Image: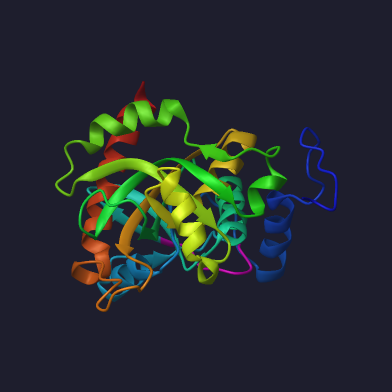
Amino acid sequence: MSLIPKQYAQPSVFTAENLLREARRQKEIPYGAIPKICVLDPDGDIVRYLVSAQRATRSPYWACYHTDLFVFAQNGIEFGIVGCAVGASFAVLIAEEMFASGCHLLVSITSAGQLVALRPPPYFILIEKALRDEGTSGNYLPPSDYSFADEKLLAWLVPALRENATPIERGTAWTTDAPFRETQAAIDAARALGLHAVEMEAAALYAFAQAKQKRVVCFAHVTNQMASIEGDFEKGAANGSHAALELLGAVGKAWQIADRR
């Protein structure tokens, strides 16, 4: 229960645009647009791989106080990416700044724990809805159990992902602020609801997207069983970066086709 009453129809006094304006002034950052498709990489593995492979360069136009945004190409499509923005509040802060800086589509690819097995890990889930067990979404939408992906985004994205070499499941997630409080009772309750994975960002990102009318799609990279077995958290080649980049290439291609219509 919130201690401060929320006025969901009222605009915020403190905006990402104003924050970025002052950051540009203080840090002498020139005005310029970031790529139209941006990526949140909470684990940071994709960013680290791209930098080590000399495939990414730091954007000179990104004015965030807290992070660096890197630019890279996949399948001839330009992307911007921010690593290590872990958790709902940090992810939404960066999402606000990305859209204020020229982003048109945001893709989040986050590690997730397996709840209901769809196949042996690692694999990806396109998150269609997420249980709101975090606080950030409550600042964007009135209380409800779930946040949902935009149906129009799913309509153009799902057919394109069927051709992906790495299978993409469709499913649901439990978004929590406290991964080290995933008690057995809570896990059992999430499984009883039919939730497939647990992660830390999707519910808030979808609430932000609905409230601000922005295009956001979230994927869970199911890599673990919450360290309940030895040898957990294996993501695949290059810590899952090859598979994640293949996924991003498919999303980017689908976006280009949809954006021309």
Tell whether 108 sits left or right of 121. Answer: right
Which residue in the rendered view is the most extreme toward the bottom? Answer: 230
The structure residue drawn at horizontal position 53% and vertical position 46%, both measured from the top left corner, is: 131
Which residue in the rendered view is the most extreme toward the top? Answer: 261
The structure residue drawn at horizontal position 68% and vertical position 42%, both measured from the top left corner, is: 140
Q: Quadrant of residue 57?
A: bottom left
Q: Is residue 241 above or below residue 169?
A: below
Task: Decide whether the magenta segment is chiefly helix, strand or loop.
Answer: loop
Tell whether 13 sits left or right of 221. Answer: right
Examine the structure image and report whether residue 235 is included in the region drawn in magenta.
Answer: no
Q: Does the image show residue 37?
A: no
Colour convention of the picture: rainbow
Q: Which quadrant holds the C terminus? A: top left
Q: Does the image show residue 104?
A: yes
Which residue in the rendered view is the most extreme toward the left? Answer: 165
Q: Position of residue 191 (x, y in %)?
A: 41, 50
Picture mark count: 0
Q: Position of residue 31 (x, y in %)?
A: 59, 54
Which residue in the rendered view is the most extreme toward the right? Answer: 4
The structure residue drawn at horizontal position 61% and vertical position 50%, both measured from the top left corner, is: 96
Q: Is residue 61 above or below residue 35?
A: below
Question: What segment carries the magenta color?
Answer: 63-70
Work out whether residue 29 or residue 95 is closer to the camera in this orientation and state it. Answer: 95
Work out whether residue 11 or residue 104 is closer to the camera in this orientation and state it. Answer: 11
Tell whether 120 sits left or right of 40. Answer: left
The structure residue drawn at horizontal position 20% and vertical position 57%, both measured from the top left corner, is: 120
Q: Position of residue 40 (x, y in %)?
A: 45, 57
Examine the structure image and report whether residue 68 is included in the region drawn in magenta.
Answer: yes
Q: Position of residue 201 (x, y in %)?
A: 51, 55
